[in-house]
Image: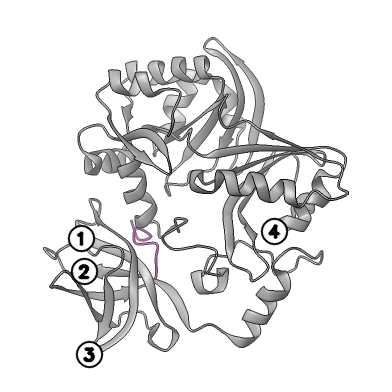
Amino acid sequence: MRKTPLLDFHLEINGSIGSFARWKMPMDYGNMLKEALETRNNVTFFDISHLSRIKVKGDDSEEFLQRLVARDIKKVKENFISGPTAFLNFNAGFKDDVMVYKFSKNDFLVVGNAVNHDKIVDWLHENIGEYKVTIEDLTFNTVMLAVQGPKSIEIMRKVLGDIIDSLTPLKFHTDIVTEHGVIKLLSYSGWTGETGFELITDIETGEKILRVLYERGVRPAGLGARDILRIEMGYALYGNEISEDINPIEAKYWVFSWKKKDDYIGREALLNILEKGVEKVRFGFVAKKGSALPRKGMKVFVGNREIGFITSGTFSPILKLPIALGYVLSKYSINGLRVNIKGNKRIIDAKIVEPPFVKNL
């Protein structure tokens, strides 16, 4: 079992600790629904140190990653993020979906899912071949934090200064000297659907920054709120919506570049899938007010015909409705179609929708 290096701090502020992808980390701080709402309406901080952080460095780094990821890394400017993109297998299934930070053509950082950490480290080493690159795992000697919400710019400006104003979406800065310590990387992406920033630092600096944020009244948010927020945005989670057996076309997850000319692992299979079409596609589901929550593994029906399955479900505190993600047979992929979701002797009346669920807010 791995654990966030900031575990003692989370216990100090009454975090409820659980396990996810073999990591001990905060699930919530008393009420995950309130934490999700606070992110939508104000600002929260998350400890996302469980995410893998793998450095790829060397003369052939760009060519190496160009061969392995589905987006065109060569077209990414220095100090910008390419993503979301993915490592695909030879059948075009997901090995992992990742964000790739480009420091230079010889220096990259790959941030991915905790559940795939060991697999991707091995995958990178397996594919080095004659490429002149080195792989360095930064996951266990750094921490990664996220500050998310419409008021995140305001609070980050107070904590870190005007450097926040020079960031634009998917841009990052490195080696920022602050009164709290050196921030190795500060990026602007906002994976919750709100304005947001990510920080990678040493452990001591990370704790200092969280303490400053907490003392300034920023509420902490745990993995439970993170899951609610990503479902509200319709974002895929590895092991739920995507896996080695699901491809980007089925998932409607555009992690690849249509115009990328260089070959990459999974490209040929992906082109074949595009030509042949797919049998199932990912959609969202909204249940009626007061319904039970759709849960992973429940089946989707039209009348007596089983047409799909649920991969993730939650209650949306912003919509005040149960929502879910899942797959339906392609011929039933009709926006607005009424369906029944069945499981554990429950029948949930719902309709198919196109995520994100919060797009009209």
The mark closer to the camera, 4 or 1, is 4
Compute the Cα span from label 4 to label 1: 35 Å
The mark closer to the camera, 3 or 4, is 3
**225 inside magenta stretch:** no
Compute the Cα span from label 2 to label 3: 19 Å
Residues packed near mark 1 inside 10 Å, few (<14), some (14 to 19) or many (20 plus) = some
Q: Position of residue 360 (x, y in %)?
A: 35, 61
Q: Are marks 2 and 3 in contact (CB under 8 Å)?
A: no
Going from N to C along the chain, the mark reached first, 1 or 3, is 3
Residue with the mark numbered 3: 304
The three-letter code of the residue at mark 4 reads Arg
Q: Which numbered circle lies on residue 71?
A: 4
Q: Which numbered circle lies on residue 321?
A: 1
Compute the Cα span from label 1 to label 2: 7 Å
The three-letter code of the residue at mark 2 reads Ala
Q: Residue sitting at 88 percent across and 49 percent down?
A: 130
Q: Which residues are magenta?
A: 354-361
